Image (cartoon, rainbow, N blue to C red):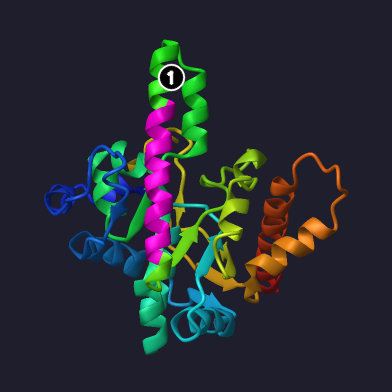
Amino acid sequence: MGITLREKFGSVIGDIMKLSRAAAKIDETKVYEEANLGTRKYMYGLLDETFSKDSQLGNIENFKEFYDDVAKNGKTGLILMEHYTNLDLPGIIYLLEKYGEEWAKDFSSRIVAVAGMKLNESNPGVRAFSEGFTRVVIYPTRSLNSVESKDISEEEKKAEEQKARKINFAAMRQMDICKKRGQIILVFPSGTRYRPGQPETKRGLREIDSYLRLFDKMLLVSINGNCLRINPENPNDMLSDILEPGKVSYTAAPVLDCKQFRDDVLAKLPPDDPDPKQKTVDEVMKILENLHDEVEAKDSK
């Protein structure tokens, strides 16, 4: 049995939070957060201990081709990646930095993750860890949908909807700025961490179709291995997540042209398909799942 993040960092979490500078509350003026390297060093220390020596980047040639498309050929780049734990983003940046070639280090420095407000607003400790990596913060659809079920007035619901629109509009503008200066946007298409026994948490969000229309190239990345597990006794407290060291592999599918991919999916649908946007996202998730299964099968031999 592993230990929780709170137990692991109990003695230094106060020091980490002293380094924190990210916003505790998000509005449309605070959607872009540059990496705080002061807090990142603590996360890297954790990964040094948690990721086994055989943790790796699979199909490294696909990572390199995607990097060249962005850094050398001026294409805009989108990473769509599986999501299991709050180590997923730190892990890919960590392994790229550690790979040992200059292009991989530059690749890691270009990644900007799209992240939900919860990482900033739920807990100061979670916020301090999260801000070690450059992010564009959004108001997630799932969070807005949950507002509808709350016992609050219609005026309060409308105010929250307006807040969400302002934040997400500002986030999209910031993403456009990022991609124009050669940064790479990373999105978790499921919008949440996968929870065993809850298949709906692995379903892609239809909003991802909008990202496909905004970028030139995309890289789909599966994640095999899991060193941080959601604590079943306290699933909503991220600092209660349980650390268990092991091997983690990030495996890249062949680089895809976003427009061509989307056109190919839509061409196979009947003209009266009720939700073509969801179908394009479903195809993304299918590729990720197949890639994940292939890696798992290879590792089990």
**What residue is rendered at 24% in x and 45% in y?**
125
Say left or right for 29 vs 56.
Answer: left
Residue 138 appears in the picture as rendered = no
- Choose top left, top right, bottom left or bottom right for residue 51: bottom left
Circle 1 Cα neighbour tier, 10 Å, few/some/many (<14 / 14–19 / ≥20): some
**What residue is rendered at 56% in x and 84% in y?**
65
Q: Which residues are magenta?
A: 161-178
Q: Amino acid at mark 1?
A: Lys
Is the magenta region chiefly helix, strand or loop?
helix
Quarter in which the C terminus is drawn = bottom right
- The answer to whether 288 is drawn above or below residue 155 in the figure is below
- The answer to whether 262 is drawn above or below residue 58 in the figure is above
Where does the image place residue 191, in percent across and percent down from the top left? Answer: 53, 46
Along the line of sight, the residue nearer the viewer: 50 or 198 = 198
Residue 284 appears in the picture as rendered = yes
**What residue is rendered at 37% in x and 36% in y?**
237
Where does the image place residue 95, in percent across and percent down from the top left? Answer: 41, 74
The residue that label 1 is drawn on is: 157
- Choose top left, top right, bottom left or bottom right for residue 221: bottom right
Along the line of sight, the residue nearer the viewer: 179 or 93 = 179
- The answer to whether 234 is drawn above or below residue 205 in the figure is above
- The answer to whether 166 is drawn above or below residue 207 in the figure is above
Where does the image place residue 266, in percent across and percent down from the top left? Answer: 78, 56
Where does the image place residue 206, in percent across and percent down from the top left? Answer: 63, 45
Magenta stretch containing residue 37, yes or no?
Answer: no
Under circle 1, the secondary element is: helix
Say left or right for 229 vs 61.
Answer: left
Residue pushed farthest bottom? 101
**What residue is rendered at 45% in x and 12% in y?**
154
Say left or right for 117 vs 209.
Answer: left
